[in-house]
Image (cartoon, helix red, strand yellow):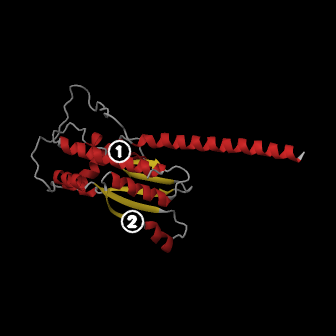
Amino acid sequence: MFQKFVMAFAITASVSASGAAAQEVDEEEAISAFNAQSYFHGDAPISKRVPAGTTMITRPAEEYPKNMMMEPISAEAKMKMMQTVMQTSPFSLRDMMNMMVAKKKVLPGISFDEVIESLNSKAFDLNMRPTGFNTPYVILRESLDPESPRLEFHSFCDLITMRKILDYSLEFGAFVPCRITIAEDAEGQIWLYTLDWDIRWLDSSPNPNRIPDDLRERAMKVRENIEIMMEAAATGDF
């Protein structure tokens, strides 16, 4: 009788373990499918922004001096432009923030420290130089809430590309170096996310003052490297 009980228990445990393993695989597949949406691979499609025969007024083609600021656009002009755009937009502020970032969910079983280790390891492989990090959660835990979720900012840069981009647009310095945020959400899930400045859609305006082809390729490579780093960190790839 006892032997039958043991056998039945073993079979039940085996079935439960198989079910748990299958559930874990399903979760990993779902996370992988979610993470795959953060970057468009291949030639980016270009949408038709204006009807055929419509002429959009832009600045004329210009020679630009390297590493120099442009004339500023007034705060009032920027406010009016953005308010005009948003009046026809269905997006909330949270929607807009969501649109401006690329994010990946870390697979279960990978710790916060392992995410950082993997991120730095892959950065080294891709010659993306670490340029600093911040750990604001430490201050938050000391001064506000001992249970404040962990939050870190890690910055990386291809220095040659950065220099070339700043020669083209010194204002771009507000967006470099590339920063990857690592954060725990309210459920303890770890996320990686970054500003999604994909040059393929940033430089799709009919304005003739386009980024030089060689710099465009470099900028695309940096964005691809950030994607590779985030994917490696999300999957525990060292």
- Kindly identify the residue that appears in the image at 47 percent across and 53 percent down: 191
Which of the two residues, 144 or 132, is positioned nearer the viewer here? 132
- Kindly identify the residue that appears in the image at 29 percent across and 30 percent down: 48
Q: Which residue is mark 1?
A: 86
Q: Is residue 11 left or right of residue 164?
A: right
Q: Residues within 10 Å of mark 2 (few under 14, many from 20)?
A: few
Q: Does residue 9 show up?
A: yes
Q: Does residue 210 show up?
A: no
Which of the two residues, 232 or 157, is positioned nearer the viewer here? 232
Where residue 157 appears, x then y in whole percent? 29, 56
- Kindly identify the residue that appears in the image at 46 percent across and 70 percent down: 138
What separation in Å lies between label 2 and label 1 (alpha carbons)? 33 Å
Label 2 or label 1, whichever comes before in sequence order:
1
Query: Is mark 2 in CB contact (under 8 Å) with mark 1?
Result: no
Q: Which residue is mark 2?
A: 134
Tag 2 secondary structure: strand
Q: Is residue 105 left or right of residue 61?
A: right
In what quadrant of the picture does the N terminus appear?
top right
Amino acid type of the residue that numbered disc 2 sits on in the rendered structure: Asn
Where residue 68 appears, x then y in whole percent? 14, 56
Q: Residues within 10 Å of mark 1 (few under 14, many from 20)?
A: few
Tag 1 secondary structure: helix
- Kindly identify the residue that appears in the image at 39 percent across and 61 percent down: 153
Q: Among all residues in the image, which is located at the extreme top? A: 52
Where residue 221 appears, x then y in whole percent? 29, 45
Q: Which quadrant holds residue 17?
A: top right
Amino acid type of the residue that numbered disc 1 sits on in the rendered structure: Met
Where residue 159 appears, x then y in whole percent? 24, 56
Q: Among all residues in the image, which is located at the extreme right? A: 1
**Mark nearer the viewer, 2 or 1:** 2
Q: Among all residues in the image, which is located at the extreme bottom? A: 143
